[in-house]
Image: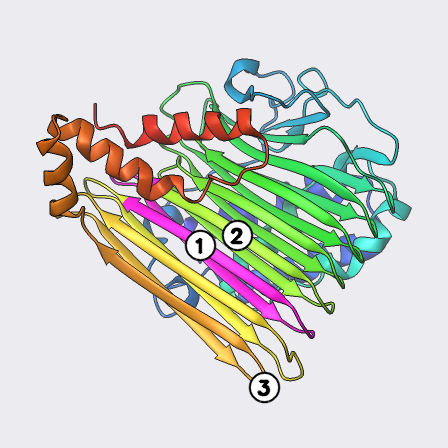
């Protein structure tokens, strides 16, 4: 057993979790997961879903589980300030809710709470969702989250309610005195006919050299005819490890539009699992990862068309500079009986250095008739002819280069619904891509 798994399965850490108030079914599930993890271990080089992401260095770490000082750590609120986000805000520092940094104002039909304060009756509807994680090593980190997460945001939007202002969920990975690992679980329930804008924001807190390891699972349920605009911004610390799983279950005629930026962290893995379970459900995904140095980012997307007349439209861009490595796995499955499905996936990637690497895997499986589907992926370099054209018009080399890269990445955030937020995302992406 690796040093990492030994520390996560430490008896004292498990005892601290078991002492917290929780439903009996959750306590039993945590115990069963601990047994499964001890038997199966973490993903290895022979685990297909993880073959491009080595965990060897991570497994040698032995972090402390949780942060005893998370509730009092100094955090600069300006690090997560965003334009036009004057609505409700829930802030978690190293997986612990911080009411002093949050603004739990609510609108009619909007309910906000936390996993740490939830009653058994509030968690009962999520019972099957907690137990859904796979029992093999590919889902080991989701299992770890099930076993150890004791806090995180719970958001409910009542049927037929339209929330005017965005709900801002902030996850701060704050520097600690030693190597720590924190866990958070988000439960988002959007009622039938409801509409809301959500922002999931991962930021760094502090500047210490001690590494930070975060593990988050977010589970979203969209009722019949629900509408969700989701923006995910990942700006974790340069020495952080961040492993996330975003699960979406869409009922009939519901629609999810997600914009995702992966910019920070030394090592990041993001599993995006989408189940188009109801007739007419629609999923739109726009994403980009921009990497430099020795960053490693792995995005693993799995979209399943389970019902008739469902649609998915996926456009992702990747940029890697210096010795960075990016991985994108985009799988679309059209199940038997899902006639009328319309599935499209495009993944284009740009290498800015001869030492950078990007691996892309588009996968399409169709088991139904009367289906429209297309998928494609490319990996290349900056078009020298376009660069020459811009330089011939008087632009310096670096300015021309920045302009081309910004245009390449900008397509994925061009339709973010809030103009001020869109401009902010453009600015942080441009700063990320600037070699100077």
Q: Which quadrant does the N terminus fall into?
A: bottom left
Q: Is residue 421 magenta?
A: no
* Residue for badge 2: 285
Residue 84 coordinates in the image, percent (x, y): 62, 22
Residue closer to the observer: 249 or 285? 285
Left or right: 112 with respect to 317? right
Q: Which mark is residue 369?
A: 3
Classify 10 Å Cα crowding around label 3: few (below 14), some (14-19), many (20 and above): some
Q: Residue at left 46%, top 22%?
A: 177
Quarter of the image for residue 340 reads bottom right
In this picture, which residue range is highlighted in magenta? 290-319
Q: Which mark is residue 315?
A: 1
Quarter of the image for residue 75 reads top right
The answer to whether the residues at label 2 and label 1 have Cβ atoms under 8 Å apart is: yes
Residue 25 coordinates in the image, percent (x, y): 82, 57
Residue 377 visible in the current orientation: yes
Residue 237 visible in the current orientation: no
Tell me the CA gap for discs 2 and 3.
24 Å
Q: Residue at left 21%, top 28%?
A: 435
């Amino acid at each position: 057993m690796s040093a990492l798994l030994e520390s996560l399965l430490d008896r004292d850490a498990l005892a601290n979790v078991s002492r917290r108030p929780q439903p009996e079914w959750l306590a039993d599930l945590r115990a069963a997961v601990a047994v499964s993890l001890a038997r199966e271990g973490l993903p290895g080089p022979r685990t297909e879903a993880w073959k491009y992401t080595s965990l060897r260095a991570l497994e040698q770490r032995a972090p402390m589980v949780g942060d005893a000082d998370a509730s009092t750590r100094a955090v600069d609120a300006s690090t997560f300030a965003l334009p036009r986000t004057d609505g409700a805000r829930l802030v978690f520092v190293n997986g612990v809710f911080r009411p002093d940094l949050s603004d739990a104002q609510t609108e009619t039909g909007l309910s906000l709470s936390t996993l740490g304060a939830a009653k058994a009756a509030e968690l009962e509807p999520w019972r099957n969702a907690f137990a859904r994680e796979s029992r093999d090593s590919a889902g080991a980190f989701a299992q770890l989250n099930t076993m150890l997460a004791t806090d995180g945001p719970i958001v409910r939007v009542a049927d037929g309610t339209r929330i005017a202002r965005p709900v801002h969920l902030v996850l701060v990975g704050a520097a600690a005195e030693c190597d720590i690992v924190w866990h958070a679980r988000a439960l988002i329930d959007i009622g039938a006919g409801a509409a809301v804008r959500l922002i999931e924001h991962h930021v760094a807190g502090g500047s210490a050299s001690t590494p930070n390891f975060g593990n988050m699972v977010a589970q979203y349920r969209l009722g019949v005819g629900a509408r969700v605009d989701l923006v995910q911004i990942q700006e974790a610390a340069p020495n952080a490890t961040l492993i996330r799983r975003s699960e979406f279950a869409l009922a009939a005629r519901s629609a999810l539009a997600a914009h995702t930026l992966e910019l920070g962290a030394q090592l990041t893995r993001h599993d995006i699992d989408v189940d188009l379970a109801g007739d007419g459900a629609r999923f739109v995904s726009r994403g980009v990862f921009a990497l430099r140095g020795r960053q490693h980012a792995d995005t693993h997307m799995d979209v399943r068309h389970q019902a008739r007349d469902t649609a998915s439209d996926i456009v992702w861009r990747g940029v890697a500079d210096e010795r960075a490595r990016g991985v994108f796995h985009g799988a679309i499955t059209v199940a038997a009986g899902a006639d009328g499905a319309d599935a499209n996936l495009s993944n284009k990637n740009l290498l800015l250095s001869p030492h950078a690497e990007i691996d892309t895997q588009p996968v399409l499986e169709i088991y139904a008739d009367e289906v429209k589907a297309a998928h494609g992926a490319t990996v290349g370099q900056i078009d020298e002819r376009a660069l020459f054209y811009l330089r011939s018009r008087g632009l310096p080399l670096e300015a021309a280069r920045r302009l081309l890269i910004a245009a390449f990445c900008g397509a994925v955030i061009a339709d973010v619904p809030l103009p001020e937020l869109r401009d902010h995302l453009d600015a942080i992406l441009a700063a990320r891509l600037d070699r100077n």
